[in-house]
Image (spheres, rainbow, N blue to C red):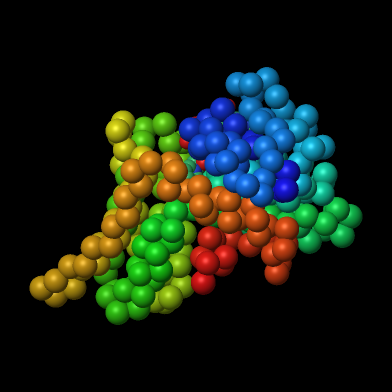
Amino acid sequence: MIRVAVAGAAGRMGLAVCAAVETAPDMELTGRADPVLQTTLEQVLGDAEVVVDFTRPDTALKNALACLSAGVHVVIGTTGFDPKLLEEAVSSPGEPQANVFIAPNFAIGAVLMMRFAVEAAQHMRHAEIIELHHDGKLDAPSGTAARTAELMAGASGQPPPPIHSVRLPGLVANQEVIFGDTGQTLTIRHDTTGREAFMPGVLLAVRRVGSLEQPLVVGLERLLF
Ligand SMILES: NC(=O)c1ccc[n+]([C@@H]2O[C@H](COP(=O)([O-])OP(=O)(O)OC[C@H]3O[C@@H](n4cnc5c(N)ncnc54)[C@H](O)[C@@H]3O)[C@@H](O)[C@H]2O)c1
């Protein structure tokens, strides 16, 4: 059994992760950290092998550093912070051995959307990204859009495409990558209709974070393909 604690356990994603961990046959939910529950991360770290973090952009980095100091692996879904800030921490010789896995999007359809956009970017030069999310989302552009743009730029040698952010009630998470060329357009679109879309990816990351090839890995595609 993998002992899992969830940071942000009272949030929209945290609640879904707690439910998914509780139903996974090979996992045990050992802690729920959230200011709303009056439980700190430090209070649940001692019982956990893996922490799953779905908190806030201004909190995720500090939480990850606390996990690493305690020798606890961490799976981060929180977006809007710079993963490069963790590179130094994971390679620091004084720290106990623990890994970090980060994915801006844990939905398989979103990973495929990014992959197809990277492919198309090598053949069609003009593109823009529109990302649409619920109005409670704190960061803009979304981590998925930023990652898509970064991957497209890396594959095409072009500057990253512009990103447009829409925030409205009723939405969960959606993204379109639109390519334009003479007499034609190509649209690659992913729609998340429920947060359960992210759970298979989160559980996969929990199972794999302890045996990563490097101590810091970014992107669900690194576990899938
Ligand atoms: N990677 C993905 O696939 C994916 C999917 C959806 C959302 N997200 C990201 O996940 C994050 C959370 O999204 P959400 O919609 O659940 O937000 P939310 O606001 O519903 O939940 C965040 C929770 O974190 C708690 N929190 C704040 N500080 C904390 C701390 N120091 N320790 C523990 N908990 C703390 C808050 O009280 C809140 O309950 C956002 O950054 C969002 O962009 C990522």
State the residue lying farthest toward the left.
183
State the image quarter where residue 125 is shown.
bottom left
Question: Which residue is at a point 56% across and 28% down the rendered structure image?
Answer: 10
State the image quarter where residue 52 is shown.
top right
In the image, 198 versus 84, the foreground residue is 198
Q: Quick check: which quadrant has ligand 1?
A: top right
Residue 17 shows in the view: no
State the residue lying farthest toward the bottom.
123
Residue 24 shows in the view: yes
Q: Is residue 145 left or right of residue 217?
A: left
Task: Residue 86 in the image: state x and y as whole percent.
Answer: 69, 54
State the residue lying farthest toward the right.
94
Residue 199, above or below 87: above
Task: Residue 66 in the image: state x and y as whole percent.
Answer: 76, 41
Task: Residue 12 in the image: state x and y as whole percent.
Answer: 48, 33
Question: Which residue is at a point 64% across and 52% down the rendered structure image?
Answer: 206
Question: Which residue is at a point 63% across and 62% down the rendered structure image?
Answer: 217
Residue 191, above or below 154: above
Q: Is residue 144 left or right of residue 56?
A: left
Question: Which residue is at a point 40% across and 68% down the rendered structure image?
Answer: 115
Task: Residue 72 in the image: state x and y as whole percent.
Answer: 77, 47
